[in-house]
Image (tube, rainbow, N blue to C red):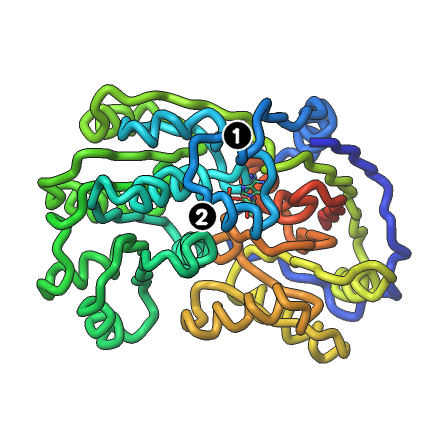
């Protein structure tokens, strides 16, 4: 990651404040500004991994190769390159990789290839910690399998369960979802975990963090025919090791660098808000500068997200919001509007925005300082994806 921190304010401070900004009611930030500066500046510039082979040189079905080429992928990312043969051979895997490293392709490509070969017949269950991530995986599956007669279904909370029950009558090779909804369908005896031979736990560490612990245990316990398990995690937590050991049989362990699918170039700046300055006006002025085409603004609480979004709209900026209090339909629509450029700004909380892959985000703005350094890195990682340049601003009171 190519990072430079400029501690000087970069925008002209707005006029005098009429009303003092109240501090966030969210979790108090544990970030020490000096640490943030240091950590961000000392990070080495990572050299993107360069695979020695192209997809065309990998042992893959020509139809799948065509679908991969159609997506614009020419070479595998590190995790894809290092895991392919193991996954084709049916091995269990512990992959230490974050979202953005191409891990969805890493598990989809070999498994789709195996289904296409016609030699095996299996169903795959994919668990993801957020609804958006589940939808993203489902979309990636569909884009890789168009015309193959391979099908996926996605089941997530916040949607009509009756429609899910209807969908379950149809054939599917991949079932992707969030644990709560999948268990709901299981309890209604509509979904049988025993039918699945392969289990993928995406963002495993986060999933256990987000309170899905019991749900994940219940699902895995009900998968008596599980013969292959793939686990992806950004970190390996010693507390989770026991569970990991129980889940995996003789696994291959592949660890990849934290980098994105391609090189990442994020320029970071801190904007100091001194007393008497109108922070909101500074935000509006910043967003109205040229080049701020697709801007993701983070705030700490759902209330603050709504408040900032409302104010941006009042200032004539096309903006929408995404957070846990919004219905799933609303969240997906807001995300689509932002992805397609129908709104310039998306204001979000951490929970809603984690793991999202929105192309061409030009700027990330931390309207409020995130609670942890990890969260900071995650947030700014929404820009500068796929080799593009990105810029991140963080407001500091
Ligand atoms: P993921 O880590 O699966 O969320 O992927 C991050 C982004 O990288 C997504 O936009 C993918 O479509 C993209 N991607 C995945 N594999 C490749 C590849 N081999 N070459 C270029 N981009 C890729």
Q: Quadrant of residue 172?
A: bottom left
Frontmost residue, 248 versus 305? 248
In this orientation, does residue 208 appear? no
Residue 30 vs 297, above or below: the answer is above
Disc 2 + disc 1, Cβ < 8 Å: no
What is the spatial separation of the Cα atoms under label 2 and label 1, in whole angstroms? 14 Å
Q: Please report the residue visible at 28 percent of the width from the left and 26 percent of the height from the top.
A: 91
Q: Quadrant of the N terminus?
A: top right
Q: How many marks?
A: 2
The residue tagged 1 is 57
Residue 350 point in image, percent of width and height: 52, 52
Q: Is residue 252 visible?
A: yes
Residue found 65% across the figure and 28% down from its top:
48
Other residues around mark 2 within 10 Å, as few (<14) / some (14–19) / many (≥20): some
Q: Is residue 3 above or below residue 215?
A: above
- Viewed as shown, does residue 89 lie left or right of 45? left
Secondary structure found at label 1: helix
Nearer to me, 378 or 50: 50
Residue placed at 73% from the left, 40% from the top? 266
| Mark 2 lies within 8 Å of ligand 1 (Cβ measured) | no
The image position of residue 138, as x and y in percent, is 40, 57
Which residue appears farthest toward the right when viewing the image?
12
Q: Which structural element holds mark 2?
A: helix
Ligand 1: image quarter: top right
Which residue does the numbered mark 2 point to in the structure image?
63
Q: Is residue 331 above or below residue 39?
A: below
Where residue 253 sits: x, y (%)? 37, 21
Residue 4 vs residue 59, the one in the foreground: 59
**Crowd tier of the residue under label 1, counting other residues whose Cα lies within 10 Å: few below 14, some 14–19, many 20 or above:** few
> Residue 275: which quarter of the image?
bottom right
Residue 205: image x %, image y %?
37, 36
């Amino acid at each position: 990651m190519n990072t430079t921190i400029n501690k000087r304010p970069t925008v002209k401070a707005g006029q005098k404040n009429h009303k003092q900004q109240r501090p966030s009611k969210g979790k108090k930030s544990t970030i020490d500004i000096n640490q943030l500066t240091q950590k961000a500046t000392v990070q080495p510039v990572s050299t993107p991994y360069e695979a020695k082979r192209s997809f065309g040189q990998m042992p893959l079905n020509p139809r799948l190769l065509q679908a991969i080429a159609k997506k614009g992928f020419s070479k595998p990312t590190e995790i894809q390159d290092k895991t392919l043969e193991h996954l084709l051979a049916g091995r269990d895997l512990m992959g230490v990789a974050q979202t953005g490293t191409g891990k969805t392709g890493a598990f989809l490509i070999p498994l789709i290839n195996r289904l296409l070969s016609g030699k095996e017949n299996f169903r795959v269950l994919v668990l993801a910690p957020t609804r958006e991530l589940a939808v993203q995986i489902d979309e990636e599956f569909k884009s890789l399998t168009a015309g193959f007669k391979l099908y996926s279904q996605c089941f997530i909370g916040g949607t009509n369960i009756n429609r899910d029950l209807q969908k379950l009558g149809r054939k599917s090779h991949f079932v992707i979802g969030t644990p709560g909804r999948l268990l709901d369908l299981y309890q209604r005896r509509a979904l049988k975990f025993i039918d699945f031979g392969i289990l993928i736990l995406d963002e495993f560490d986060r999933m256990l963090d987000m309170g899905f612990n019991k749900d994940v245990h219940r699902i895995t316990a009900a998968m008596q025919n599980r013969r292959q398990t793939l686990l992806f995690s950004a970190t390996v937590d010693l507390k989770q090791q026991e569970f990991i050991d129980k889940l995996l049989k003789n696994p291959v362990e592949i660890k990849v660098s934290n980098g994105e699918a391609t090189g990442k170039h994020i320029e970071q700046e801190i904007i100091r808000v001194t007393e008497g300055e109108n922070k909101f006006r500074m935000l509006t002025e910043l967003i109205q500068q040229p080049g701020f085409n697709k801007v993701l603004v983070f705030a700490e609480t759902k209330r603050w997200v709504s408040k900032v979004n409302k104010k941006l709209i009042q200032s004539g900026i096309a903006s929408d919001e995404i957070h846990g209090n919004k219905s799933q339909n609303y969240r997906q629509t807001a995300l689509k509007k932002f992805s397609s450029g129908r709104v310039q700004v998306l204001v979000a909380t951490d929970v809603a925005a984690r793991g999202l892959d929105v192309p061409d985000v030009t700027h990330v703005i931390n309207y409020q300082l995130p609670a942890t350094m990890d969260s900071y890195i995650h947030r700014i990682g929404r820009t500068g994806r796929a080799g593009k340049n990105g810029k991140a601003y963080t407001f500091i009171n």
